[in-house]
């Protein structure tokens, strides 16, 4: 375990307070990005915490990066950091890439399509402080959490993925495939070093590894609302690679 002293001396630590780096991976999120950034600025502004927003765009053909550049001008390059990549390299590696540029001592990972509402972030932070947790995971499958706007097929895929992972790996967290989470930065780094998966299965592997390494996990119920603009990048390929990743983990852990 990491001691409190080590934490205080960690790079990016801010005297007298914590700093939160929000990672926003984007692929064709031109319509959603201005609103999610505005909401983040609003909720962080109200709470008074130090923060930065790191946008990792993977060469979106819809011009998301140009929109991001405008936002950088509006809110300032200390708040909005652009860390683009040339092409679509997958969600898992987008987080890793973003994390390398994070200067906060905490990292928040969320979707940029408004399915994850920034209003939950103050609750994540409160929860983290309450239990001094290493990880706080948003959960759709406990308390007041839920999913809105998904069709039956998508609900079955998500529930099914959670269910078989629960049975095979018993990770002791209620939402394994969700991606709205807060990590202590050095914990995220350790987890990422151990993770082998690249795509959507990454979320699940992260929580399984966190349990293995005995990190503490707090949960906050969240409502996940299906996107209005643009479309999901989760396709048949991602489902196949999720299953492959799950079986690999089952065989190796
Ligand atoms: N940079 C980058 N590269 N961003 C990506 C990529 C990529 O290859 N693929 C997706 N994204 C971004 C999207 O632009 C969005 O901000 C976020 O990652 C989530 O992608 P969606 O395509 O909207 O995912 P979803 O709504 O189908 O899936 C959600 O639920 C899953 C399971 O419940 C996400 O929260 C997943 O992470 C989650 O596993
Ligand atoms: Mn989405």
Image: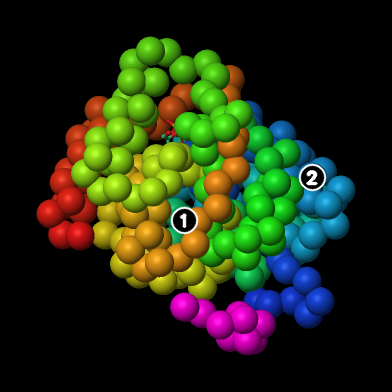
Q: In this rendering, would 72 be left or right of 54? A: right
Residue 68 drawn at (x, y percent):
65, 46
Judged from the image, the quadrant occupied by ligand 1 is top left
Q: Nearer the viewer, residue 128 or 60?
A: 128
Residue 253 drawn at (x, y percent):
20, 60
Taking the spot 52% from the left edge, 38% from the top edge, the residue there is: 139
| Residue behind mark 2 | 43
Q: Which region shows up in magenta? A: 1-9
Taking the spot 83% from the left edge, 52% from the top edge, the residue there is: 47
Q: Nearer the viewer, residue 132 or 15?
A: 132
Sequence order check, earlier mark of 1 and 2: 2
Q: Nearer the viewer, mark 1 or mark 2?
A: 2
Q: Nearer the viewer, residue 99 or 108?
A: 108
| Residue behind mark 1 | 95
Compute the Cα span from label 1 to label 2: 22 Å
Residue at the top extreme, as displayed: 152
């Amino acid at each position: 375990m990491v001691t409190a002293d080590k934490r205080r001396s960690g790079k990016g630590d801010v005297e007298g307070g914590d700093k939160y780096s929000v990672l926003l991976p984007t692929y064709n999120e031109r319509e959603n990005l201005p609103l999610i950034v505005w909401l983040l600025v609003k909720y962080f502004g109200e709470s008074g915490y130090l923060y930065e927003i790191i946008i990792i765009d993977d060469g979106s053909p819809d011009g998301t990066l140009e929109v991001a550049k405008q936002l950088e001008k509006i809110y300032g390059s200390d708040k909005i950091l652009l860390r683009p990549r040339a092409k679509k390299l997958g969600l898992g590696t987008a987080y890793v890439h973003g994390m390398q540029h994070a200067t906060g001592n905490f990292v928040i990972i969320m979707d940029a399509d408004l399915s994850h509402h920034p209003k939950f972030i103050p609750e994540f932070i409160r929860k983290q402080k309450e239990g001094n947790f290493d990880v706080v995971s948003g959960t759709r499958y406990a308390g007041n959490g839920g999913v809105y706007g998904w069709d039956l097929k998508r609900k079955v895929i998500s529930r099914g993925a959670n269910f078989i992972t629960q049975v095979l790996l018993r990770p002791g967290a209620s939402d394994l495939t969700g991606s709205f989470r807060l990590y202590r930065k050095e914990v995220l780094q350790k987890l990422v070093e151990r993770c082998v998966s690249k795509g959507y299965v990454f979320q699940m592997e992260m929580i399984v590894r966190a349990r293995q390494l005995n990190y503490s996990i707090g949960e906050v119920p969240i409502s996940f609302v299906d996107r209005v603009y643009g479309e999901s990048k989760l396709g048949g390929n991602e489902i196949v690679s999720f299953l492959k990743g799950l079986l690999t983990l089952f065989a190796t852990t």
